[in-house]
Amino acid sequence: MIRSVHRWPGLFAALLLVLLALSGSILSVFPAIEAMGAPAQSEATLSVAELASRIQGVYPGVEQIRRAPSGKITAFWFDAGTPGGAVIDPTTGQGVGSADISPVQRWLTTLHRSLFLDDTGRIVVAVGAASMLLLAISGIALVVRRTGGWRHVFVRLKGPLAGRLHVEIARIAVIGLILSSVTALWMTASTFGLVPEGSGPPPFPQVSGQGGFSLSQMQALHDTPVTALRDLTFPYPGDLTDAFTLKTDAGQGFVDQGTGILLAWLPLSAWDQVTETIYMLHTGQGAVVLGLVLGLLALGVPMMAVTGTIMWAAGRRARPRLRQNMGAGQAETVLLVGSEGGSTWGFAATLHAALTAAGQKVHTAPMSAFAPDRYTQANRIIVLAATYGNGTAPASAKGFLDRLAASPARPIPLAVLGFGDRSFPAFCGFATEVANKAQARGWNTLLPMDTVDRQSPQDFARWGRALGAALGLPLVLHHQPVTPRTDSLTLISRRDYGVEVQAPTAILRFALPDVPLWRRLTGFGVMKFASGDLLGIVPQGSQVPRFYSLASANADGFVEICVRKHPDGLCSGQLTDLQPGQTVRAFVRRNPDFRPARGRRPVLLIGAGTGIGPLAGFVRANRRHRPMHLWFGARHPDSDMLYGEDLRDWAKDGHLATLNTAFSRTAARSYVQDALRRDGARVAQLVAGGAQILVCGGRDMAVGVTEALADILAPQGLTPARLKAEGRYAEDVY
């Protein structure tokens, strides 16, 4: 619900909000320019009486003197029936510039206030301000939900760049955007008389009927400093029943033109002060620095519009269209989906269609939208949950476990189906956690938790038969995985290792895919990647992709992976048989959590076997010579020292600070975790100093590394789990 409230106003109002934000940001600069251009007031104690006398001496027909919050003083007069106006130098009373607002500022002001549509435009602008307020409030709620509560609102974000930028900008700009939108709505309401007006001037008093009293002798004007002046209006020429009207920061009143006596005075009311404060907050008039800050924050709106649209488009691509998707309150079956890359949504669409065809009313939504209070007609809840990384929640399941823990159990049976890859140590780890916590909270079980390995249609169909039996429905699930759009990669070189120890391994380098010029210029559909991202390859005879960690980035000008041939390995066998000139079809999956963090702090790279791939890519890209320390384990230095010459060269030229190796098929016989223990003191010192740890390789190696680091860091009061929570320990394990 919150996501919909945030998404649709943002999409529909994006262009209007960008226009208002940009015009408002530019307008915020004018008060600063005005303040810098205002004539300096040499006499700090100058009174209104002295200022008015000087101006009247130069312009005898003066009718009004104004002082802006910036300090700029303007005067307006009639000379032989011709109106005039000028910016005044208070030390001389002489005009030093035009009183007219610049055409650019006037044009921008009209655009910002009413879009050149008068009252209709003001209403449209008010709708835009209301949309901005709604977006800001719902955005805060989404950030809180995504990060797991108010305590974690400012934690380091993970995920695609567009999403991270969107939230980071929102974190900074949200207070300013709320302030600007609220004050804009108030000012519009005031324009249309929807809020009470201020107290206004006091009742006009009885005057002396005389004139000609010297301005310099008027006590009320003499007691008012220029710095407090807002407006002094002169009596109408020749009208002895009129009086001077004096407006200051403290209030307004009337001064007799014949006696100089203050006849009536009304202090500024609390309501007037609120109204003027709102005007100041919105325009920056009288608060130049605040105005510039709000104008700067407004520039976040175009950025959030762009990143928000990218996120929306990516979400639309990731989720299939669901026909007859019932509302949460009307559905008999609630289907919740936790997906990272989008493949689990495909399975959800197949299940949704099959249940709908069987006569069920089905509501399908992301796990992040879990709201059991809304499932008033539901007979069952089915959760399809993938696992991201090392057992964490995927993108569309953020906050699910927190809401599950906060919600009392309902008498609604619940089933959990996990999606993952058995070669990973945390196979269906998140789904398992969901099932365990639901059981602990007292939710009834519709089916025992089950799993789907590597997007297997056969596993899914088997589970579907069990679900159909539990529901008493003839449920048959025929799912065809959708392969992402791929590019053709041509192999340009290969380096072979490991033949002597019966572990054939190759470093395969492919040319970047050839794309049309228009795609290169626009960036549309261009393969973009960094070291540590994953290259998905669909082998011939299969629909399920295999993933390999990338050892290169776009900037390197090639695509590089390390592949070890596994017995009966379909994809690894095809890849290691490739010869230069031959091609494969591939796509990139982003893996932004596995890469060096920004900054200059040291990085500990730990890997074994083909796990050296992304680590070598990080070192290759280390042109600023950030301290990178590599611990690498292999079988034998003569047979499978992957990137051996490169690593030695990088150690010489500063790309790599230290190179530490361990070999399991030599007389010394050691593993990478043994090398870490050997260098324990240095490792502990680096980690205590803020170093980041990146581990890549087989799961047995990763377990050994974790155990070694736990022992090494214990005296420091640190653990691998704590480092992971701080974003300083990441694994890419297979």
Image (cartoon, rainbow, N blue to C red):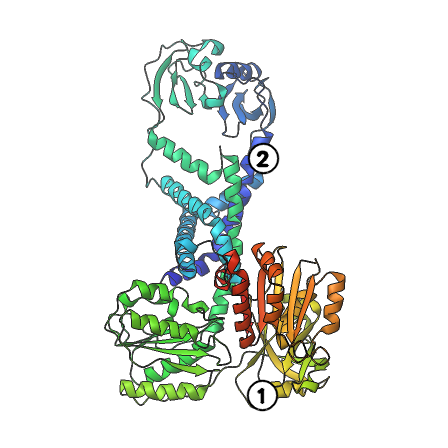
Q: Quadrant of the C terminus?
A: bottom right
Q: Amino acid at mark 1?
A: Gly
Left/right of residue 617 with respect to residue 56 in the rendered view: right
Left/right of residue 103 with respect to residue 235 in the rendered view: right
Q: Quadrant of the N terminus?
A: bottom left
* Residue located 63% across and 74% down the image: 670
Give the image quarter of residue 452.
bottom left
Q: Amino acid at mark 2?
A: Ile
Disc 1 packing (10 Å; few <14; some 14–19; many ≥20): few
Q: Give the camera-side residue of 485 and 149.
A: 149
Secondary structure of residue under mark 2: helix
Q: Give the camera-side residue of 685 and 669.
A: 669
* Residue located 44% across and 58% down the image: 10
Task: Inspect this view and state whether residue 77 appears.
Answer: yes
Task: Give the total of numbered labels.
Answer: 2
- In this rendering, which labeled residue sits more in front, label 1 or label 2? 1
Q: CA distance from mark 1 to mark 2?
A: 70 Å
Image coordinates for residue 101, horizontal then vertical, percent? 55, 35
Give the image quarter of residue 557.
bottom right
User: From the viewer's perspective, is residue 127 above or below residue 504?
Assistant: above
Residue beneath disc 2: 33
Secondary structure of residue under mark 1: loop
Disc 2 packing (10 Å; few <14; some 14–19; many ≥20): few
User: From the viewer's perspective, is residue 330 above or below residue 146?
Assistant: below
Image coordinates for residue 294, horizontal then vertical, percent? 50, 43
> Mark 1 or mark 2, which has the lower sequence index?
2
* Residue located 52% across and 84% down the image: 544
Residue beneath disc 1: 569
